[in-house]
Image (cartoon, rainbow, N blue to C red):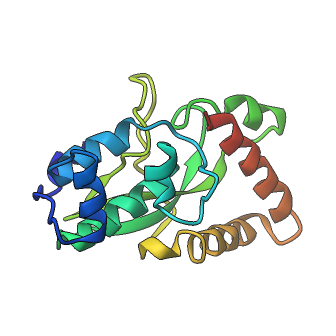
Amino acid sequence: MYSVLPNKALNPHGTLSDIFIGMSFESFHQICEWVWHLPYGRPNDSQHYMSVVNEKKGTCSTKHALLKALADELRIDVALTVGIYAMTEANTPGVGHVLKQYRQDFIPEAHCYLTYQNHRVDLTRLMKAESEPITAFFIEKNILPDEIQTAKPPFHYQFIQNRFGCDKAPLIWAIREQCIQALSV
């Protein structure tokens, strides 16, 4: 999955590199592998990507923001992208019972991933073979690692308002939150 990304040795003079060197990592790809295998779940401090290191779990936002920040430190030219997709049981196993309860075919979900030379790299969680990949997005935009809480939620909520209207948006957001809870460890 991450093999399309450039690999570099950690720089012992960078803040994140120093942390990962202290954890016995040597390269960007080793850290990508580690992050990919961490459980999916909202860390207690979901506003900062360092929570992934501290709590050994993360969401698409925190995991990819951490990798983007490290890539920046290593001068690897990747983007942190947020895209809105139609979340279904087929592409996001575990949300089907919530969608069925509310008679929704899908919920628009904001998903973060890395982008490199027109490749999307999603290291959120290991997917089951029977899962459909998330490949179709309504809209995408690049953000900075420190914007996972300031830019992503308003972008996502505005999309929901535009699609469902201002009156129905709070209900759609609440259903979405239940879907995310269903995915968490």
Query: Of 143 and 138, which appears nearest the observer?
Result: 143
Q: Which quadrant, please, contains the N terminus? A: top left
Residue at point 76%, 35% (across, down): 98
**In the displayed structure, would residue 90 be above or below residue 177?**
above
**Along the horizontal axis of the image, is 89 left or right of 60?**
right
Task: Give the residue at the far front of this rendering.
Answer: 22
Residue 91 position in % (x across, y down) = 51, 37
In the picture, measured across the screen, residue 2 lies left or right of residue 171, that is left
Picture layout, residue 30 above or below residue 16: above
The image shows residue 24 at horizontal and vertical percentages of: 22, 45
Where is 40 relative to 52, above or below?
above
Residue beneath the point at 60% across and 54% down:
109
57 with respect to 5 (left or right): right
Residue at image x 52%, y 50%?
A: 59
State the residue in front, 157 or 150.
150
In the rendered image, which quarter is residue 6 located in? bottom left
Is residue 105 in view? no
- The image position of residue 42, as x and y in percent, is 61, 48
Number of numbered discs: 0
Q: Taking 155 as reference, is 99 left or right?
A: right
| Image quarter of the C terminus | top right
Q: Quadrant of residue 102?
A: top right
Q: Is residue 119 visible?
A: yes
- Above or below: residue 73 compared with residue 44: below
Looking at the picture, tell me which residue is in the foreground, 37 or 16.
Answer: 16
Q: Position of residue 116 (x, y in %)?
A: 23, 63
Residue occupying image coordinates x 24% and y 62%: 17
